[in-house]
């Protein structure tokens, strides 16, 4: 099966599943509407029989209310049945796909198999795509994901399809947005900086709570939500008279965590996909180890953020809600060395809202522990290239520094 045929099949299966879901929902709505209608009809009969025996001037009021409720129930039945009829037409239109994949499990399995095959042929996938968006944090994984996407796009003769987007949360290390722009400019790719209203600290202030692992609003509200409107605009600019194929490239590696290990190399983004665009999330470096990432950076002379040289392994917010105490203490000591205001800013916000940064400890405790370590050991120091030295050895670091001098 060709790449384009595979993509069309994926969308046909997706639409068939959506039609089947809508039909089931409509059936449930019809049953509910008929139940409500039956209850309203019983109430109407009750008051119709009782009114003649009632005295007083206000005896018509209960009957009027029952009549109105019965009329509303009849209208609800008509709307539900019309919705069911439309859903039945949609199901019939997708009957061949539903006959072949009658259950949700079979539909998911078929899409997964097709996507896995497409992931084995990145150049063909890029040729079939209309738009390729690299979502970058400017961190090491995003950097290598960008480099490999560009290499595949050049091999396909499709570099013009690639764009880069970075969401600035306002709580990252200094120079992150500027680095993201330079990383894109290295390849001559259009770059878009998105700045969500209020940023991370504004969101915390509004909610009076920090996010956590179960409620990662910093990801959903500040990174994922701004993506949809951007994709809508860029797809509209393509001016296609058909559904656009969009590849959304992420620097996600399976070795980072148990949950990320379960992610597919290529997945259907059902939240963002619509009638005019089929959006696929492409975890292009999913199978790489951390050492392989650094090998790509070192051998290609890619510019990484100097925060990695301090011993911090991730370029996230200065204070990440997913980080453990050792990581946060080190981040605080780096802030002291760079004379950054983040420890004071975050700790004051924690006191102001009365909600601990983490369930088991406070940021004020983290700052105090960092000060004690600085007093005992002195301020931390680092050299340019230390991240490469740590992961690949001194020779690789010397070679990297020579490439990037």
Image: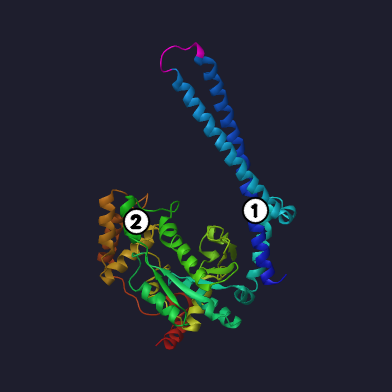
Q: Quadrant of residue 322?
A: bottom left
Instruction: Label 2: state its secondary structure.
Output: helix
Residue in the foreground of this view, choosing between 186 and 303:
186
Instruction: Label 1: state its secondary structure.
Output: helix
The residue wearing badge 1 is 17
| Residue at the outermost front position | 57
| Residue 203 numbered mark, or none | 2
Q: Which residues are magenta?
A: 52-58
**396 lies left or right of 329:** right
**343 lies left or right of 289:** left
Question: What residue is rendered at 34% in x and 74% in y?
Answer: 175
Residue in the foreground of this view, choosing between 151 and 379:
151
Q: Position of residue 363 (x, y in %)?
A: 31, 56
Could you tell me if residue 378 is visible in this image?
no
Q: Position of residue 216 (x, y in %)?
A: 43, 55
The quadrant of the picture occupied by the N terminus is bottom right
Q: Position of residue 264 (x, y in %)?
A: 59, 63
Q: Is residue 112 above or below residue 72?
A: below
Please tell me whether mark 1 or mark 2 is closer to you in this view: 1
How packed is label 2: few (under 14 Cα within 10 Å), some, or many (20 or more)? many
Q: Is residue 277 magenta?
A: no
């Amino acid at each position: 099966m060709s790449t384009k045929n595979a993509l069309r099949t994926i969308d046909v299966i997706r639409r068939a599943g959506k039609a089947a879901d809508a039909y089931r929902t409509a059936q449930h709505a019809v049953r509910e509407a008929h139940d409500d209608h039956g209850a309203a009809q019983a109430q109407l009969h009750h008051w119709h029989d009782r009114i003649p025996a009632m005295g007083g001037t206000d005896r018509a009021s209960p009957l009027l209310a029952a009549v109105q409720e019965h009329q509303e129930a009849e209208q609800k039945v008509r709307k539900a049945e019309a919705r069911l009829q439309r859903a039945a037409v949609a199901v019939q239109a997708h009957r061949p796909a539903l006959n072949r994949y009658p259950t949700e499990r079979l539909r998911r399995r078929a899409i997964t198999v097709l996507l896995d095959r497409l992931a084995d042929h990145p150049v063909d996938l890029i040729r079939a795509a209309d738009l390729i968006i690299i979502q970058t944090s400017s961190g090491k994984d995003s950097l290598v994901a960008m480099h490999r996407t560009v290499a595949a796009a050049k091999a396909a003769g499709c570099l013009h399809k690639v764009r880069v987007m970075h969401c600035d949360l306002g709580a990252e290390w200094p120079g992150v947005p500027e680095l993201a722009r330079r990383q894109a400019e290295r390849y001559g790719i259009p770059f878009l900086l998105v700045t969500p209203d209020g940023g991370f600290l504004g969101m915390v202030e509004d909610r009076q709570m920090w996010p956590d692992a179960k409620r990662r609003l910093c990801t959903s509200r500040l990174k994922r939500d701004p993506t949809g409107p951007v994709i809508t605009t860029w797809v509209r600019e393509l001016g296609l008279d058909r559904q656009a194929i969009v590849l959304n490239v992420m620097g996600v590696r399976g070795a980072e965590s148990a949950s990320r290990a379960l992610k597919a190399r290529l997945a259907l983004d059902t939240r963002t996909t619509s009638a005019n665009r089929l959006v696929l999330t492409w975890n292009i470096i999913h199978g790489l180890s951390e050492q392989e990432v650094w090998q790509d950076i070192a051998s290609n002379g890619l510019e990484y953020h100097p925060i990695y040289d301090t011993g911090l392994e991730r370029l996230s917010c200065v204070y990440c809600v997913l980080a453990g105490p050792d990581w946060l203490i080190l981040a605080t000591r780096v802030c002291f060395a760079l004379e950054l205001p983040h420890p004071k800013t975050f700790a004051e916000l924690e006191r102001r809202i009365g909600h601990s940064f983490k369930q088991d400890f406070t940021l004020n405790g983290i700052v105090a522990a960092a000060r004690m370590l600085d007093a005992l050991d002195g301020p931390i120091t680092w050299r340019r290239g230390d991240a490469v030295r740590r992961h690949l050895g001194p020779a690789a670091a010397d070679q990297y520094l020579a490439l990037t001098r």
